[in-house]
Image: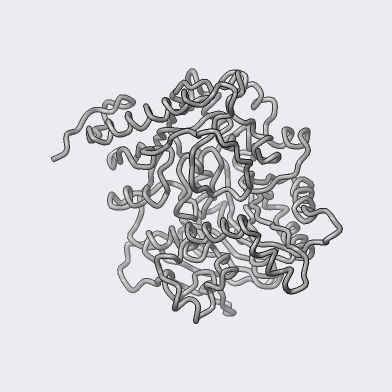
């Protein structure tokens, strides 16, 4: 039997002693690695993988040792909370909580996204219309600052400013070593209804009604997202927690989840998944991006090992492309110019969403588009969505033809301008092109400057603009 000790943060939470000691040792190694970085060098994480789509400059300076900070410290089923290390992936987190009948309030759609990454860099999924963003279920965080000190930030108290300023700071205010998060009950399965729409206005109107009521045709809706394939073909997927037994679908083999949504019936198409498979429904094909690698062609799919049908493997292929310029070489062989990468998620007020979608489908040759409604519970200064107002996250991840003599970022800049015009916001995990004044206007510059003065007075960490736009 494991030996248990009381948590230093919460004496009521009994934690296996081995996990506590392992966490303490991992934090000690992290602090030691911080002290080994030259005082005039920028502090970075020593990570082999990332879910960021923007490149960063190599420095040759050793990074922070985050080895040993990738696990779950404890799950408390009675209080529906979990203490989790900052580098823990959501795949491992769900594996630890689901046996207790619990899951995080928001589980971002890709397995290798880390909890610390989703909190400092934002995340979203089909529960966001009722549960907000991942950082809104955080109860407290231990954060390594640019000074080398570790502090515990909570919604109130001495470091409340850091707690509220940490989301969307992308490691520029520090790195979370431990987070305590709220959990919610999960049912064994999720019943799905896929609603077909022939115009985007009707889709958005129905989405708005479901967000407001939490129901559709009298049935509770626990999960809500959608896909727009064109201006005349769109779908909302309504998910409801279910205790009902019965056959379930599997989209880790030959079946492709996003293709299962499509139909042309006035009645909803129904489906059922285990909760585990529902949470990871997008991962086997990285939404629809696996088609770029041929993985959706039946003959290729039959030969493609199942264990490699996951986002983490596609990331490795993307890394090879970035390293060797494979895609551009193939385009050149066909006599075509290089392509501009357009990989973004934006939040648009729901009242302007149909307008944005029509504009996008006219101007940017990318489809499908992912649609995910979100309501933030309170004001977060570095990503200031209006509390209790519904926004729709529109995700698009592909590339477009580039004018050889034109701006290599023309499409991305056009999208940024349109999102700004519609009073929306853009996530910063991918390329951004704002000038510095625009950037700080969008992302809480005054508040951010005060936080930097307090928590990183010697600028040991890269500032947010340098990370997001200058890609340092």
Residue 460 vs 434, above or below: the answer is above
In the image: residue 308, left or right of residue 358: left
Residue, x 48% and y 60% (percent of image)? 313
In the image: residue 153, left or right of residue 386: left
Q: How is the image coloured?
A: one colour
Residue, x 35% and y 39% (percent of image)? 82
Residue, x 77% and y 72% (percent of image)? 335
User: In the rendered image, is residue 208 in sight?
Assistant: no
Residue 439 vs 255, above or below: the answer is above
Give the total number of marks visible in the rendering.
Answer: 0
Closer to us: 207 or 137:
137
Q: Residue furthest front?
A: 60
Query: Looking at the picture, how far across and down is residue 69, in whole percent?
Result: 38, 38
User: In the rendered image, is residue 338 in sight?
Assistant: yes
Query: Looking at the picture, how far across and down is residue 100, in whole percent?
Result: 28, 49
Q: Residue furthest bottom?
A: 299
Residue, x 57% and y 79% (percent of image)? 265
Closer to us: 440 or 269:
440
* Residue 368 figure quarter: bottom right
Can you say which quadrant of the picture contains the C terminus? top right
Query: Looking at the picture, how far across and down is residue 55, in whole percent?
Result: 63, 47
Query: Looking at the picture, how far across and down is residue 182, in whole percent?
Result: 40, 40
Residue 129 vs 283, above or below: the answer is above
* Residue 191 figure quarter: bottom left
Q: Residue furthest right?
A: 405
Closer to us: 112 or 322:
322
Closer to us: 197 or 158:
158
Can you say which quadrant of the picture contains the N terminus? top left
């Amino acid at each position: 039997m494991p030996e248990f000790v009381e948590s230093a943060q919460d004496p009521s939470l009994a934690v296996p002693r081995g996990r506590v000691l392992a966490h303490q040792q991992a934090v000690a190694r992290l602090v030691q690695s911080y002290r080994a970085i030259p005082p005039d060098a920028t502090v970075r994480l020593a990570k082999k993988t990332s879910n960021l789509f923007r490149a960063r400059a190599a420095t040759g300076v050793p990074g922070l040792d985050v080895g040993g900070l990738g696990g779950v410290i404890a799950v408390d089923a009675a209080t529906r909370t979990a203490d989790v290390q900052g580098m823990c992936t959501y795949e491992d987190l769900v594996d630890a909580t689901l046996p207790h009948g619990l899951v995080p309030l928001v589980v971002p759609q890709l397995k290798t996204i880390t909890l610390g990454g989703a909190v400092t860099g934002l995340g979203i999924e089909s529960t966001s219309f009722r549960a907000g963003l991942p950082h809104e279920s955080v109860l407290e965080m231990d954060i390594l600052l640019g000074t080398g000190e570790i502090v515990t930030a909570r919604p109130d108290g001495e470091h409340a400013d850091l707690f509220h300023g940490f989301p969307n700071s992308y490691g520029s205010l520090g790195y979370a070593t431990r987070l305590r998060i709220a959990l919610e009950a999960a049912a064994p399965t999720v019943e799905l209804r896929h609603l077909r729409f022939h115009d985007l206005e009707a889709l958005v109107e129905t989405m708005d009604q479901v967000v407001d009521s939490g129901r559709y045709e009298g049935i509770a809706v626990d999960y809500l997202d959608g896909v727009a394939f064109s201006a005349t073909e769109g779908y909302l997927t309504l998910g409801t927690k279910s205790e009902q037994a019965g056959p379930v679908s599997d989209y880790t083999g030959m079946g492709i989840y996003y293709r299962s949504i499509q139909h042309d019936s006035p009645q909803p198409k129904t489906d059922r998944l285990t909760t585990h498979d529902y949470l990871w429904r997008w991962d086997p094909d990285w939404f629809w991006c696996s088609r770029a690698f041929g993985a959706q062609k039946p003959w290729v799919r039959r030969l493609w090992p199942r264990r490699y049908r996951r986002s983490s493997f596609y990331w490795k292929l993307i890394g090879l492309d970035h390293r060797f310029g494979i895609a551009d070489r193939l385009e050149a062989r066909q006599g075509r110019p290089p392509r501009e990468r357009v990989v973004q998620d934006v939040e648009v007020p729901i009242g302007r969403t149909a307008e944005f979608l029509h504009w996008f489908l006219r101007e940017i040759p990318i489809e499908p588009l992912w649609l995910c409604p979100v309501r933030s519970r309170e004001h977060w200064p570095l990503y200031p969505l209006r509390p209790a107002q519904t926004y729709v996250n529109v995700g698009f991840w592909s590339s477009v033809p580039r004018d050889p003599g034109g701006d290599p970022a023309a499409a991305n800049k056009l999208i940024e301008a349109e999102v700004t015009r519609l009073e929306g916001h853009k996530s910063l995990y991918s390329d951004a092109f704002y000038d510095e004044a625009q950037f700080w206007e969008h992302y809480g510059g005054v508040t951010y400057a005060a936080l930097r003065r307090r928590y990183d007075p010697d600028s040991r960490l890269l500032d947010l603009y340098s990370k997001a736009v200058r890609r340092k």
